Image (tube, grey):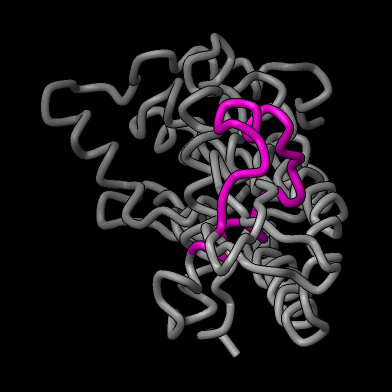
């Protein structure tokens, strides 16, 4: 069926009896009316007027689908879905990353929700195209459109594992305070360290302070000191070897106090976080 999806720039008589062709521009599909005289297609109106009068009959993913299938009838559906989603996300990033508050926002989550809403509107709008197409081609497009929405759910799924020791009330308070103070970004119940604003050394400092405060540092090293429990935080932030940030800092310093350490200290100095 894919090889029969020659729709764009293909002049013919369509299911509804109209004669014309579809032309794509910026992921919008326009209907250009033609005449057929003695086997020759021609614009019904002068060229400039034809484009001015041309209605838009489809938008968004469906237009991208038609272009992709015509270029490669054997394209894998996952490749098609991924490519379109990432293309749209890149467009979003280019615009939003220039804004003053971009560093503190979870652009991936913002885009995911916005994209689904926009594409649902585009899918509804694009039903105008179906008036021109045969039933099997309509079904073909609908199936791809429906499965696109099913596929991109994975971009918004919360796959983060929160260790049990960080699900206590005290741990939740610390994490929430860190979010309020911009150290951590929280979106769809996922915690991410705000690397755009604070370096990894401060992440290590936060983890160390939290480990001691929450009583996670149980083991004792050779010098009789408690050791930091890094593993729960590496799991939480999906970051390996957080301790290396501390070691890098201590190469030049005697005391582990990275830049902006006061931002972490105040999380534990707040009265509502102080243990009795």
Q: Which picture quadrant has residue 268?
A: top right
Reply above or below: 230 against 254. below
- Residue 17 within the magenta-colored segment of the rendering: no
Q: Which quadrant of the view contains residue 17?
A: bottom right
Residue lying at the far left in this picture: please name it: 252
Q: Is residue 161 above or below residue 215?
A: below
Q: In the image as oriented, which residue stretches furthest toward the front?
A: 38
User: Who's the residue at 19% across and 22% down the image?
Assistant: 254
Residue 158 in the image: state x and y as whole percent. 69, 61
In the image, taking residue 193 as reference, residue 50 lies left or right, namely: right
Question: Residue 224 appears at what percent x and percent y?
Answer: 34, 51
Depth check, front residue: 228 or 124 = 124
Q: Residue furthest bottom?
A: 1
Let me know if residue 56 is in the magenta part: yes
Residue at point 32% right, 54% down?
A: 241
Q: Which residues are magenta?
A: 41-67
Residue 225 at x, y percent in the picture: 37, 47
- In the rendered picture of this protein, how many numbered marks are placed on residues? 0
Residue at x-position 41% and y-position 53%: 239
The answer, for residue 247, to whether it is visible in the render is: yes
Q: Is residue 151 left or right of residue 252?
A: right
Which of the pair 63/230 is nearer the observer?
63
Residue drawn where x is 84% and y is 50% of the image = 125
Q: Quadrant of the C terminus?
A: top right
The reply to whether residue 65 is visible in this rendering is no
Q: Quadrant of residue 48?
A: top right
Return the residue nearer the eye: 216 or 54.
Answer: 54
């Amino acid at each position: 069926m894919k090889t029969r999806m020659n729709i764009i720039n293909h002049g013919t008589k369509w299911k509804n009896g109209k004669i014309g062709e579809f032309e794509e521009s910026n992921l919008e599909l326009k209907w250009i009316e033609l005449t057929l005289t003695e086997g020759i297609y021609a614009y019904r109106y002068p060229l400039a007027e034809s484009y001015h009068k041309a209605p838009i009959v489809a938008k968004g993913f469906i237009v991208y689908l038609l272009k992709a299938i015509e270029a490669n009838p054997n394209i894998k559906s996952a490749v098609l879905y991924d490519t379109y989603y990432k293309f749209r996300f890149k467009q979003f990033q280019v615009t939003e990353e220039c804004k003053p508050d971009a560093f503190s926002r979870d652009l991936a989550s913002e885009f995911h929700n916005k994209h689904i809403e926009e594409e649902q509107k585009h899918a509804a709008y694009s039903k105008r195209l179906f008036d021109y197409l045969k039933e099997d081609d309509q079904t073909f497009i609908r199936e791809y459109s429906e499965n696109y929405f099913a596929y991109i759910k994975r971009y918004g799924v919360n796959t983060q594992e929160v260790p049990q020791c960080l699900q206590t009330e005290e741990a939740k308070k610390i994490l929430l305070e860190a979010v309020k103070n911009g150290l951590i970004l929280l979106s769809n119940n996922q915690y991410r360290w705000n690397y755009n604003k604070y370096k990894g050394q401060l992440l290590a400092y936060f983890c160390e302070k939290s480990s001691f405060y929450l009583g996670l540092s149980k083991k004792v090293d050779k010098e009789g000191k408690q050791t930091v429990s890094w593993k729960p935080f590496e799991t939480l932030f999906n970051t390996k070897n957080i301790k290396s940030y501390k070691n890098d800092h201590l190469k030049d310093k005697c005391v582990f106090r990275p830049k902006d350490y006061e931002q972490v200290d105040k999380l534990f100095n707040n009265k509502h976080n102080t243990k009795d």
